[in-house]
Amino acid sequence: MRGEFDLIRKYFYQRQMNRNDVHLALGDDCAIVKSPKGVRLVISTDTLVEGTHFVAGANPAWIAHKALASNLSDLAAMGGTPAWCSLALTLPEVHEPWLQSFCDAFFRLADEYDIQLIGGDTTKGPLSISLTVHGFVPEDNVLLRTGAAVGDWVYVTGCLGDSKAGLELILSDRSDAGPDHEILEERHYLSAPRVLAGQALLGIASSAIDISDGLVSDIRHIAKASGVGVSIDVSQLPVSEVLLQYLNDDLTLARQYALTSGEEYELCFTVPQEKTYLLDGISRQTHTQFTCIGQVNSANQIVLHDQGQPLPWTLSGYDHFKVNE
Amino acid sequence: MRGEFDLIRKYFYQRQMNRNDVHLALGDDCAIVKSPKGVRLVISTDTLVEGTHFVAGANPAWIAHKALASNLSDLAAMGGTPAWCSLALTLPEVHEPWLQSFCDAFFRLADEYDIQLIGGDTTKGPLSISLTVHGFVPEDNVLLRTGAAVGDWVYVTGCLGDSKAGLELILSDRSDAGPDHEILEERHYLSAPRVLAGQALLGIASSAIDISDGLVSDIRHIAKASGVGVSIDVSQLPVSEVLLQYLNDDLTLARQYALTSGEEYELCFTVPQEKTYLLDGISRQTHTQFTCIGQVNSANQIVLHDQGQPLPWTLSGYDHFKVNE
């Protein structure tokens, strides 16, 4: 087994790009890197476990993409520029086609974001992937959860809800899968981390978070950290055509999906009124859709409404809604 | 389950120390840290998986110690000063006494080496622990595997062989366990990473590695990376009294254990003749035993001898010896 695991290392190390700030990426007890002057390091770790974060037999390319994208999304939420990552890969056995597919997807995304694999560990055991990513933020500028102020407007990137629909399709293993179903499954696994948008929002957004648990859960983190409340106009929630089709054009249900869908890896952020005029330019430059969905208030809670009207449904528990009696 | 895993985070975050170079350790998408001027970062990742690196039901305190110690040992082998670590902890369930014991041991060792837990991830799945540690080395000074030169002397810290004996006892589950057996089991799990010795050897040792696979395997990494050979005088190998007792005073067998025992987390390093006079002082200052076990030569292979005499046994395969016909 030992020899086979040595093979894995070669698999990864052959594919290395070379950043100037990486002095040693492999072949010793540690990697050696140097952070540039005037920056702070932002560091995040995410683990994906078979059976918990993806189903057994899932496409290895999709697993690799999701593992790296979910970590890059954490950097994006701080406005960070990706730099280096370490990969702890645990595999039950060495299966070369699986590895080939995993590596191809991993390095495709890593190259796109100029992040270099500097080290890690390969071990035998139940399938899991743990990544630690490192990025840079300017010394005086970072996106935190703590800066939302009363009156700020609340925005999200992209569309919301597709990931939840995709996960349902993956778990249901439905045989009637059409082309739309494939799109939704891909939306669950193949999100595009909002790295460029996050960087561009430095100095503009007053707070940010990435949507990993679901919009309502994650916005609650901003509200709690900032000591504020948020009102969300559900009529403004951006939902995709493909989600509406999947839900038989039930717009209410689509909005409920948008509010609770996890693992979206879109950004939710707040912007002070006087800086909102900057968003159109950033949206165009970063090819990212921004949608204003609500406003920060002093009420210390998350309130949902439909264009100012109370809703006949409320969130019950972690990700389900109930109709009010 | 989600709520329980939130609990884990609190478990760890309550115990945080606060280093000056850590600006944010928890509660946002990333940790934020700053590396001091004039240093490079050394980064290492190690994963321990139940059933592969420790037996099911192993003492959680010992698992925590081993996970952090094995990572600190990688920093030690580069001469690094520990700074920050990220912990990816995957657990089948939340069992508070287990967590308490794990955390107590983890933070005891972390505090000892002034390393701060800055983030990580807690997930549900088969038990495994993946740690990424960060440390500093001076910009112009690091211990690599590549610097061994012909004529340099080869040293090891501490005693070798106990870890292998300890692992045998753990796996055999022997009921005749005496006090010595407990010592050997602890030697397997509770090694002391040679961080101080590694730092003190900066500028003195020409190469270094930590002994994780076994002395012969690891010294081969130095030889290969440096393009040299090494001769080892097995009569000089440091073996403990408790190992000799365990092996019924079979000195040959004890030396074979010393040559192949993995997960020792001692350092093996080379020193040029003209700097060897410095080792006595470092040994005293760092309370670390150094033993000269051989010399670097140009032969491009690892040769074992007994005070210059050929040995009637040679290494066969990864960790077994055979008697020559």
Image (spheres, coloured by chain):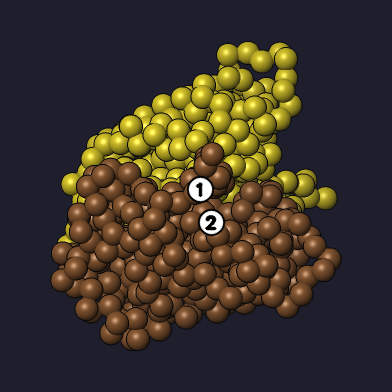
Chain colours: A brown, B yellow
In the image, A41 versus A293, the foreground residue is: A293
Q: Please give the residue where the numbered disc 1 appears in the rendered image.
A: A313
Secondary structure, mark 2, is helix
Q: Above or below — where is B301 with respect to B96?
A: below
**Callout 2 amino acid:** Gln
Kindly identify which numbered label has been placed on residue B61: none
Q: How busy is the neighbourhood of tag 2: few (under 14 within 10 Å), some, or many (20 plus)?
A: many
Can residue B235 be seen? no
| Chain of the residue under the numbered disc 1 shown in the image | A
Position of residue B61 measured from the top left corner of the image (x, y, whole percent) = 50, 27
Query: For the point 19% across and 73% down, which residue is it?
Result: A275
Q: Quadrant of the N terminus of chain B?
A: top right
Secondary structure, mark 1, is strand
Position of residue A216 measured from the top left corner of the image (x, y, whole percent) = 43, 52
Q: Are marks 1 and 2 on the same chain?
A: yes
| Chain of the residue under the numbered disc 2 shown in the image | A
Query: For the point 33% across and 32% down, which residue is it?
Result: B14
Q: Please give the residue where the numbered disc 2 appears in the rendered image.
A: A256
Q: Is residue B25 left or right of residue B62?
A: left
Q: How many marks?
A: 2
Q: Quadrant of residue A98?
A: bottom right
Position of residue A40 measured from the top left corner of the image (x, y, whole percent) = 24, 62
In the image, B153 versus B148, the foreground residue is: B148
Q: Above or below — where is A311 with respect to A28?
A: above
**Callout 1 amino acid:** Trp
Q: How busy is the neighbourhood of tag 1: few (under 14 within 10 Å), some, or many (20 plus)?
A: some
Q: Quadrant of residue B270?
A: bottom left
Q: CA distance from mark 1 to mark 2?
A: 10 Å
Query: For the point 30% across and 36% down, which residue is it?
Result: B16
Q: Are marks 1 and 2 in contact (CB under 8 Å)?
A: yes
| Mark closer to the chain start, 1 or 2 | 2
Query: For the point 65% across and 27% down, which residue is it?
Result: B57
